[in-house]
Image (tube, grey):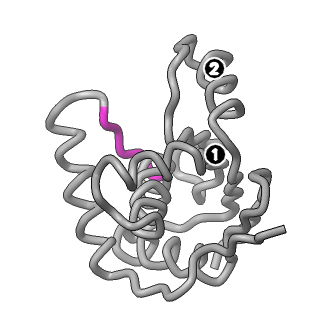
Amino acid sequence: MSLVSIINNYPKFQLLSPAIKSIIETVTKGENVSFSRVTIIAAGDPVLNRLKKQYFHDDVLTDTISFNFNEPGEAIEGEIYISIDRIKDNARRFDNTFQQELILVILHSILHLIGYNDQHPDEKLQMERLQQRYLHQIHVKRLFRVFKK
């Protein structure tokens, strides 16, 4: 299993490591790839908007940004930033639970690290199919914790 690090930079919110590892293992087995290190950073809209402007020259809100650090042929290493604000909004907009939307965003991000793209309609369709396939294979009870204080 790869080394998975989680950085919780969203107030009163914590991603739970066992569930994240389970999601990554599901995709790793399904795609027959290996990960060496994955860092997932839970943050809010301001952080992802700043990254989007800095690295992609695009002033938009986004639910996830993935950075791949490995060379071709090496085990996959990368960082995934997820916006808890966007995921909450998407869950409401698409009539999903927050947890289901969070899983979809994590799956989407992992697929990007593996090398899948979604810039063209056929690529986007392929990623959506893979996300749905893995979503149905994942059975995590608790992916996150919210603190009241």
Between residues 66 and 71, which one lies in front from this camera angle?
66
Q: Amino acid at mark 1?
A: Tyr
Check the image and name the residue furthest to the right: 149
User: In this rendering, would 99 be left or right of 138?
Assistant: right
Span colored in magenta: 114-118
Q: Position of residue 45 (x, y in %)?
A: 63, 35
In contact (CB < 8 Å): disc 2 and disc 1: no
User: In this rendering, would 30 be left or right of 56?
Assistant: left
Which residue is label 2 attached to? 55
Between residues 48 and 27, which one lies in front from this camera angle?
48
Q: Position of residue 147 (x, y in %)?
A: 76, 71
At x 30% / y 28%, what residue is drawn? 119
10 Å crowding of disc 1: few (<14), some (14-19), many (20+)? many
Q: Picture quarter containing residue 44?
A: top right
User: In this rendering, would 73 be left or right of 8?
Assistant: left
Residue 112 drawn in magenta: no
Magenta span: helix, strand or loop, mainly?
loop
Q: Amino acid at mark 2?
A: Tyr
Which residue is label 1 attached to? 81
Residue 115 drawn in magenta: yes
Point out the image quarter for the C terminus. Answer: bottom right
| Secondary element type, mark 1 | strand
Of pointers 2 and 1, the one earlier in the residue sequence: 2
Check the image and name the residue furthest to the top: 57
Cα distance in 3D space between marks 2 and 1: 13 Å
At x 41% / y 87%, what residue is drawn? 139
Q: Picture quarter containing residue 50?
A: top right
Between residues 88 and 5, which one lies in front from this camera angle?
88
Q: Position of residue 49 (x, y in %)?
A: 62, 26
> Viewer-nearest of labels 2 and 1?
1
Point out the image quarter for the N terminus. Answer: bottom right
10 Å crowding of disc 2: few (<14), some (14-19), many (20+)? few
